[in-house]
Image (cartoon, rainbow, N blue to C red):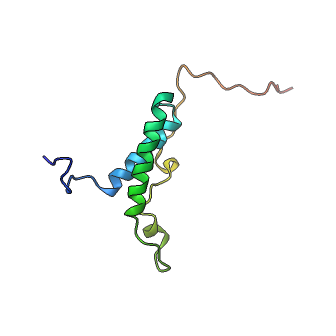
Amino acid sequence: MASSSDPDSGVTIQDLTACVNLIDVCSRRGAFQGTELESVGLLRKKLTKILEAHAPPESEESTPASSTAAAPASSTDTDPPETPREDAPKKRGKGKTKA
């Protein structure tokens, strides 16, 4: 079992990217209370700085796919389609009726 000070803890850059994406998804879905937002935001900022430090250097010869491999993916790319909650209010039209 790896200790927290062990440099080979098994956590990868992809794991950190997934954590940033998870924070974004949870935040968008309202999973955090107001009192938790600051600490969650600070953690996200720390993870993003680590990802930026480990990102490959920008070069003119790099392809778009390789230059974004270690950068956090847009959370919209990884979100499953949202299903409406049963307790959510139903969306209604603007009152226009067909004649």
Rendered residue at 44%/41% (across/down): 23
Q: How many marks?
A: 0
Residue 66 horizontal/vertical position (percent): 43, 69
The answer to whether residue 88 is above or below residue 51 is above
The quadrant of the image that shows the C terminus is top right
Residue at the extreme left: 1
Residue 27 shows in this picture: yes
Q: Which of these two is toward me, 8 or 65?
A: 8
Q: Is residue 8 left or right of residue 85?
A: left
Rendered residue at 43%/39% (across/down): 40
Q: Which of these two is toward me, 51 or 94?
A: 51
Residue 16 horizontal/vertical position (percent): 36, 51
Q: Is residue 87 left or right of residue 52?
A: right
Residue 80 shows in this picture: no
The answer to whether residue 60 is above or below residue 67 is below
Rendered residue at 40%/58% (across/down): 51
Rendered residue at 15%/48% (across/down): 2
Residue at the extreme top: 87
Residue 75 horizontal/vertical position (percent): 49, 48
Residue 39 horizontal/vertical position (percent): 43, 37
Residue at the extreme right: 99
The answer to whether residue 76 is above or below residue 38 is below
